[in-house]
Amino acid sequence: MEFKDYKQEQEGYISRMPEVLARVYGRKPTACIFTYGCQQNVSDSERIKGMLTEMGYALTDSAEGADFVLYNTCAVRGHAEDRVYGNIGAMKHYKKRHPGMIIAICGCMAQQEKVAQRMKKSYPYVDLVFGTHVQYRLPEFLYKRLNGSSRIFEIPQEEKIVEGIPVHRDGDFKGWLPIMYGCNNFCSYCIVPYVRGRERSRKPEDILNEARELVAKGYKDITLLGQNVNSYGAGCDFGLNFAGLLRKINEIEGDFRIRFMTSHPKDCTTELLDAMRDCEKVSCHLHLPFQSGSDRILALMNRKYTREKYLSLIKAARERIPDISITSDIIVGFPGETYEDFKETLSLVKEVRFSSLFTFIYSPRDNTPAAQMDDPVSREEKGKWFDELLRTQEIISREINADTVGKTYKVLCDDFGRKEGKMAGHTNGTAVIEFDGTEEDLGKFINVKVDAISNVLEGTRIKEN
Ligand code: 5AD
Ligand code: SF4
């Protein structure tokens, strides 16, 4: 694996950008970043914002009048792409009013050749299109465009790891920490391996340094990110797998939580579950997508595990961590799925009793094997199955919530409540509890006893003594 250093690669551009920005704008220019999709994209955007602020941009939430507008896009479902096309279409008017505006698109959608071509042809006001592998070259792209280069389209497949990119984090106490990039699994419905490339792991020391830095800055909730964190370190000579990495991060001193996503059931081991049990800072939450409860569909999806294996993992997790919150992703209406197959998904949902679910109707993606398969079931029919799944999960979630009444949880206060005078916090698992509090509580751990359930869990803070 090739490792590169951002500063070394981009130094020539980074050092000249302040002078270029002063010449072009004569004031501090503004940048507006829109982020779509998963946490990996949110984390990438934090690095993009880091590069921009280091170059001298001020960040803004409004595209109107901004000097640089960037769409960091998602390609996992068609709907995500349609939204981006719609929103970029609307930028035409903003640019008319502010002709100096630079408009850019990056991320998973931009990595596709057909999208770059469509931008080239039909969106002449889009200045930069760059893919997932070259985000670190943003200073170079901006430098060139601001110095009169023609529109830039850069979507090479150069897979590497670039360290040393500055990070401008969105939150002050919840932090994302990417540990690996890409995916090797080629689930037959999924575009991710094509747009993010092969799996590659960051070096343990780079991850540990970033984790230590987060803790030192007061971050209380660190989420390790990767498409399949369970295969961290595969093919590398780190001498450390994901379970080992968790144990190392757990050793960092401080009062903080460690979360991670996403785990693939085929690579989820009892060694990992043991590490979760042993590491007091690792939260009681496992996000373990099963996608379908039918073995026939799982095989067509190329998921490489069976329903039985999945259920045995859940059992092993609960034996070790009895109050673990388990969440999952499900695809409804995969090509060729019948109602009988779907009933297997429903029965698995009832058997496992997930804390919550992320449910999606299958969306065909270009160049994936599933997009070539026969898909006879109508969208309307799939919608009915989807609603049935939601209703089933709603009942389970309500029952799981009811079980929390009377219990006390340590929550990390991370948001305002829905009513004046209320704050909200996450438990060590996935539940959110509201309680009386003030802005002062943000970023603090507070013990809260659940009293009642309305739309959310409501609790009272327990005095420390
Ligand atoms: N259609 C619908 N859902 C999809 N996902 C991935 N690809 C598709 C697709 N083509 C879902 C999977 C995955 C989650 C991130 O998105 O459930 O786990
Ligand atoms: Fe897509 Fe499967 Fe990789 Fe997840 S594991 S990113 S669903 S190919």
Image (cartoon, rainbow, N blue to C red):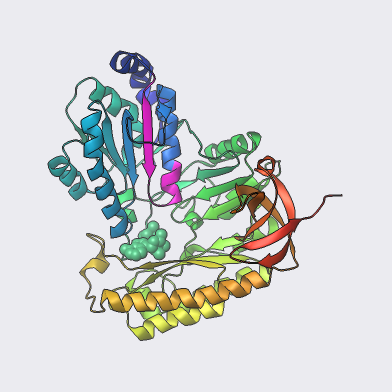
Q: Position of residue 447 (x, y in %)?
A: 75, 54
The quadrant of the image that shows the N terminus is top left
What residue is drawn where x is 28% and y is 36%?
Answer: 104
Q: Position of residue 61 (x, y in %)?
A: 41, 36
Q: Is residue 419 above or below residue 59?
A: below
User: Farthest residue in the left direction?
Assistant: 121
Can residue 410 be spotted in the picture? yes
Q: Is residue 342 above or below residue 262?
A: below
| Magenta stretch: includes residue 322 | no
| Magenta stretch: includes residue 36 | yes
Q: Is residue 461 left or right of residue 140?
A: right
In this figure, what is the number of numbered marks? Answer: 0
Q: Is residue 137 left or right of residue 355?
A: left
Quadrant hosting residue 208: top right
Q: 88 or 416: which is nearer to us? A: 416
Q: Quadrant of ligand 1?
A: bottom left
Q: Position of residue 416 (x, y in %)?
A: 60, 48
Quadrant hosting residue 144: top left
What residue is drawn where x is 68% and y is 72%?
Answer: 403
Q: Which residues are magenta?
A: 28-43
